[in-house]
Amino acid sequence: MAATTHTVTNQVPPLVGYDVFAADRALCEAVERHIEPGVLPVAREELGALGRSAGSAQAQEWGAQANEHPPVLRTHDRYGNRIDEVEFHPAWHRLLGHAVAAGLTDAWGRPAGHVRRAAGFLVWTQAEAGHGCPLSMTHAAVPALRTDPVLAAEWEPRLTSYVYEEGLRPASEKAGVLFGMGMTEKQGGTDVRSNTTRAEPLAGDGEYLLSGHKWFCSAPMSDGFLVLAQAPGGLSCFLVPRVLPDGSRNAFAIQRLKDKLGNRSNASSEVEFDGTWARRVGEEGRGVRTIIEMVAATRLDCVVGSAALMRQAVAQAIHHATYRSAFGGLLIEKPLMRNVLADLALESEAATVLAMRLASAYDTDTEEERAFLRIAVPAAKYWVTKRCTPVVGEALECLGGNGYVEESGMPRLLREAPLNSIWEGSGNVQALDVLRALQRERQALDAFLREVGKARGADHRLDAAIKDLLTELADLEGIEARARRLVERMALVLQGSLLVRWAPPEVSDAFCASRLGGDWGAAFGTLPHSLDLASVVARARPVAD
């Protein structure tokens, strides 16, 4: 065949060799907004370095390799000894090592630590999302362990270390460790109070032996796990190390790895405990209360992770449309494609702004902000994670058939997109958690309303939406059946209020007109044509100034 038939034209160059952080204006502005001036230069420098790494060809190759070569379970060694180890591709370890070295497990003890870590997590997740699971759980284990000062003093320096060491050894011999979590069981799922795993106390203070199973235990090669089990005094929280202080392996039998839709680089497993040594964390019978702060922190990471997936998908779509020509011009210049891209960009920016606002509340850590988080975290987790899948799916379509091909990276994003809506409590759980806060904690609703009220008077559509929300909140009787509708509205009002305060007028105008004002269709690309859509798209284009 003649070589001339293979001349390549009108193909889009790969989106590579760029600073993922600097190219994201919404994220850069959020970092500047939420980090005090004295810390900001250091934060900018570290996030810029991470952003350049995330946009590099090397990191993109690591991400592809870690998913093309999923983890493999080795239950026994060649001699028949039980080892229960999971082998990962070297790319997995490189991704984790880079993330730990960038401080993505250290938020609780440094200035503006949560904003810096959330921004870094949003940036680095765009290189590969699966390894975010052990990063998230390691970060989130800190507040649960702090209920026991002795355990916290022993483990927190290892959890927040900037050193990643793979392999199973006693934690005391490692410069840094990773943590996992085990709550769900076959018979209960989210209903953890129905757990059947038993904890029998030993003579040593706070020491127990566990017997039972966990239906989902992610990152089983972590150094320690926080798990729930039934002690004599009720459901309690325990720390389960993989390796005991004397160097022997704890009883931790991995039955199999889950064959998942996405998240393929990460090992999710089923494990059996049979005389497994554990140390109690917190009081007997207060396991849910002990572990709930860990759950809240991982839920925030679900929001941040979904914002990251959306941002990467939108960046790829806009990049493609910037270079691809069709019907006599660039796609990005076509009014209808511009409408689609602007609509996607709005969703992405709203998710980013909300995620970073929640992270800043953790840093502020006042009674007002803690009350705000009790409603805002489950509401954001409900809505942002649900928006991720349609956003990524539409962005993939912007690339046409090229987006449906694995080499584009878009199918991996699409497979990953539903995950965060399921992990740490699916949609109904989040909606019910919001209702519980509304009914039991008046200060939480007051804090939420004060937050959205900061933007009142700036946009008539937002004002009308707040008024409608107040009417709906006035009647909480029989509200469970309409909980999703209510929580969706709360999340949209919160996003709208944040954008009105902090985003450029073209962004807030388009968001309020569509999401709050009702001038929107049932699919992306149905924004009012009179809006400044070109500016919205230009703002979201992944090109650093």
Image (tube, rainbow, N blue to C red):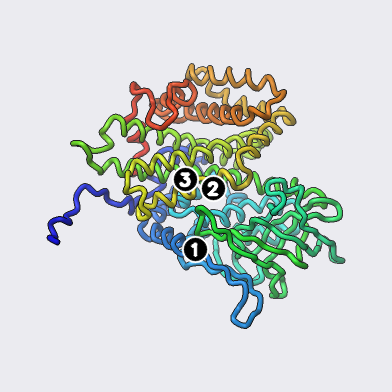
How much space separates mark 3 and mark 2, taking CA atoms? 13 Å
Q: Nearer the viewer, residue 111 or 191?
A: 191
Q: Earlier in the sequence, mark 2 or mark 1?
A: 1
User: Compared with residue 325, is residue 186 higher up or lower down, i.e. above or below?
Assistant: below
Can see residue 112? no
How much space separates mark 1 and mark 3, taking CA atoms? 22 Å
Residue positioned 70% across, 51% down in the render: 144
Residue positioned 26% across, 37% down in the render: 331
* Residue 303 image point, x, y percent: 54, 42
The answer to which quarter of the image holds residue 274 is bottom right
Say which element carries label 2. Answer: helix
The answer to which quarter of the image holds residue 176 is bottom right
Say which element carries label 3. Answer: helix
Q: Earlier in the sequence, mark 1 or mark 3?
A: 1
Label 2 sits on what residue type?
Leu
411 sits left or right of 166 in the view:
left
Residue positioned 87% across, 66% down in the render: 203
Q: Could you classify mark 2 by the number of other residues whose Cα lies within 10 Å: few (under 14), some (14-19), or many (20 or more)?
A: many
How much space separates mark 2 and mark 1, taking CA atoms? 17 Å
- The reply to whether dot 3 and dot 2 touch (C-beta < 8 Å) is no
User: Compared with residue 343, is residue 211 higher up or lower down, i.e. above or below?
Assistant: below
Residue underneath mark 2: 419
Say which element carries label 1. Answer: loop
Residue underneath mark 3: 308
Label 1 sits on what residue type?
Pro
Query: Hey, which residue is sitting farthest bottom in the picture?
Result: 79
Residue underneath mark 1: 70
Label 3 sits on what residue type?
Ala
Q: Earlier in the sequence, mark 3 or mark 2?
A: 3
Q: Nearer the viewer, residue 240 or 479?
A: 479
Give the number of the mark in front: 3 or 2.
Answer: 2
